């Protein structure tokens, strides 16, 4: 009886390992197929003309001449939008997550979690409608000249990614062993000092995961920006209150309006550029995470 049970357990372990490895292989195959498909379809369109059209790269980067048929304004608009979004969401998201994990107790913590769950469950199109309705309200009662713009899109995206930052921060702190908290108290730290000097560096990897998820969500979302200020041709962002271009909308616009195969190929090229830009932003976020870890440990 014992040998039969032992054999059954070993067989179950083998099946579990096989299932896990098959799942990993399936994910890699799916990602590999997606990347191969994009590269095969988009590489023929990757050239300087796709990004800068007939404008000199130096003149385009320095703003001496506008780029109307290239993707450079969309690249600059996406980078600016993501930067503003993270600027608006980073400190409130991290701070709220730390407060939720270390200071909020009882009903207060339950209310915060409920609010974050509701915000996380809000579809992006609803967040876009919220931003558009806010502009209509401002135009009707306070600011007749108010219009959809870059800062409005960044604000709505910040609200969209805020639950990701709060939840991942809270979970990263909750996963820390209680011995770290006791160590801080035994060394004479106050709770706030222990959080900043001991717990925050230890939870840095979890915070980095939340930041990367928030960056990816902000860079790829289309529904929000469609209703809050993105257009097909706006040039480089002229200011926080101006219209702007963005790569996700450019991809959507090209794929929905193309009339020739060459135009669709440009859309695949734009998708590759968006992936590269997201990778660069992720690398920057990883560097910021390491810097914050060093500063917090001082």
Image (spheres, rainbow, N blue to C red):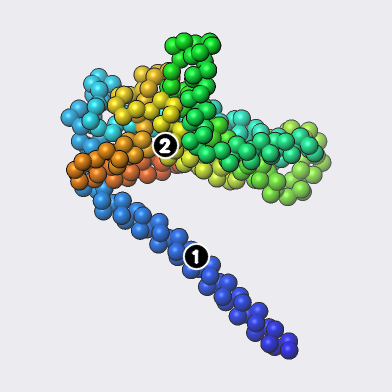
Closer to the eye: label 2 or 1: 2
Quarter of the image for residue 207 reads top right
Tag 1's secondary structure?
Answer: helix
**Percent x, y for residue 193?**
73, 33
Q: Are marks 2 and 1 in contact (CB under 8 Å)?
A: no
At 73% from the left edge and 89% from the top edge, which residue is drawn?
1
* Furthest residue in direction front, as rendered: 140
Residue holding disc 2: 222
Sooner in the amino-acid sequence: mark 2 or mark 1: 1
Q: Is residue 196 left or right of residue 244?
A: right
Tag 2's secondary structure?
Answer: loop
Question: Which numbered tag is attached to residue 23?
Answer: 1
Q: Is residue 82 left or right of residue 70?
A: right
At 36% from the left edge and 35% from the top edge, which residue is drawn?
249
Quarter of the image for residue 279 reads top left
At 49% from the left edge and 29% from the top edge, which residue is drawn?
129
């Amino acid at each position: 009886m014992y040998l039969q049970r032992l054999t059954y357990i070993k067989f179950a372990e083998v099946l579990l390992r096989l299932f896990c490895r098959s799942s990993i292989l399936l994910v890699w195959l799916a990602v590999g197929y997606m990347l191969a498909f994009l590269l095969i379809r988009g590489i023929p369109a990757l050239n300087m003309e796709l990004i800068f059209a007939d404008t000199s790269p130096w003149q385009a980067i320095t703003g001496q001449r506008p780029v109307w048929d290239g993707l450079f304004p969309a690249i600059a608009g996406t980078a600016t939008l993501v930067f503003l979004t993270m600027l608006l969401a980073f400190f409130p998201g991290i701070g709220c997550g730390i407060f939720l994990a270390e200071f909020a107790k009882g009903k207060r913590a339950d209310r915060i979690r409920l609010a974050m769950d509701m915000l996380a469950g809000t579809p992006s199109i609803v967040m876009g409608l919220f931003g558009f309705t806010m502009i209509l309200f401002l135009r009707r009662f306070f600011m007749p000249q108010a219009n959809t713009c870059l800062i409005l899109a960044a604000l709505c995206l910040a609200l969209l990614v805020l639950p990701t930052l709060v939840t991942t921060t809270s979970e990263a702190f909750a996963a820390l062993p209680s011995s770290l908290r006791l160590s801080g108290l035994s060394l004479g730290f106050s709770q706030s000092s222990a959080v900043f000097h001991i717990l925050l560096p230890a939870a840095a990897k979890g915070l980095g995961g939340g930041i990367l998820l928030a960056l990816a969500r902000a860079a790829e979302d289309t529904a929000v920006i469609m209703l809050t200020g993105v257009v097909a041709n706006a040039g480089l962002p002229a200011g926080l209150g101006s219209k702007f271009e963005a790569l996700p909308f450019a991809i959507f616009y090209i794929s929905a309006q193309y009339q020739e195969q060459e135009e669709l190929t440009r859309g695949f090229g734009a998708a590759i550029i968006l992936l590269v830009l997201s990778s660069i932003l992720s690398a920057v976020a990883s560097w910021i995470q390491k810097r914050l870890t060093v500063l917090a440990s001082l």
